[in-house]
Image (cartoon, grey):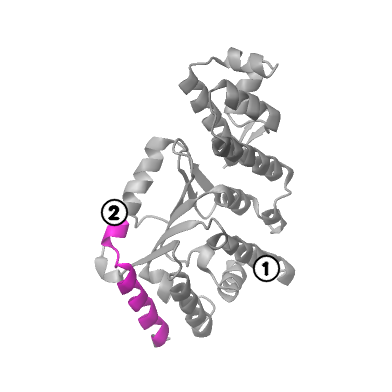
Amino acid sequence: MRGDQGNRTSTVLGRRLGGELLRLRDGAGKTQQQAAHVISATGTKIVKMERGWVPMRDPDIRVLSEFYGLDDPKAVARLLELARLDRERRKAKGWWQHSPNAGALAEYIAMEDVANRVRTWQLALIPGLFQTAEYARSLAVSDGVWEDPDEIERIVEVRMKRQSRLGGDKPLQVYAVVWEAALRQLVGGPAVMRAQLGQLLDVAKLPNVRLQVLPFRTGGHPCVTGAFNIVSFTEAEAVDVVHVDTIATTVWVENPEEGAVYSTFFDRTARLSLAQHDSAVLIDTIRKEL
């Protein structure tokens, strides 16, 4: 998730921003020394910026964008927004930072906050963006890490706030594929799951949400080894970022080649899944059985 270079910290947002500046510089045929000159800095600073080791100043981004020939105001504004979120992330001032043990989740939410699309594959859990408060609370309680009721409520609050991205002027596009096991696992008991499956049916009706279920009868499938999220961004040159949670750590996949593998596996699993209408029928059937 993070890498240290001396007292410098590399964040996912910082690396993404630095990577975009690097691609712009390469595309413009400029050297690191030339880039350093236009912002009155050293070549070392450009290296640190492009590797995401340092927070970036808005004036430097504007000057470098112009120097690299980026004249699209919206694209420049997106870079500035990434820089702002990265600075907030480093200073732990984002709203998502108020959750206990928020490190990995906070960094993911920061990415999600500036994304335009998320593809998520879930084996055993309802996607966080679709969870009811009761379901999220039951997960936090069963986790065993948090015993303080106030901490648990802050975790629930974080998950509920994330769902604001499903609405608004530019809602997040979400393509979710969920294994049938996640629908049948009685998190919180039958009443909680009935409400959760009802929420799934409602969310699936949103124009920016595509929800499919991979049924048990499919048997083996490409994504049987674990859940993951693929986060995409508006700019054509932006690289997808893959987020993989394990029991002990969080893995970020940030290079195009490895990201393409996850994308291919997601697409293969989606093709094996039920169509949206049939998925809704299965969800409703399971809900009525509870």
As displayed, is residue 231 above or below residue 74? below
Secondary structure, mark 1, is: helix
Q: Amino acid at mark 2?
A: Arg
Marker disc for residue 12: none
Which of the two discs, 2 and 1, labels the residue nearer the N terminus?
1
Asked if labels 1 and 2 touch by Cβ distance under 8 angstroms, the answer is no
Locate residue 190, reporting x and y percent. Answer: 49, 84
As displayed, is residue 284 above or below residue 234? below
Could you give the CA–CA distance between mark 2 and mark 1, rounded to whole angstroms? Answer: 36 Å
Residue 273 inside the magenta-drawn segment: yes
Q: Which label lies toward us, 2 or 1?
A: 2
Side of 124 relative to 278 (left or right): right
The range drawn in magenta is: 268-288
Neighbourhood count class around disc 1 (C-alpha, 10 Å): few under 14, some 14–19, many 20 upward: many
Residue 12 in view of the camera: yes
Residue on which disc 1 sits: 152
Q: Quadrant of residue 139?
A: bottom right
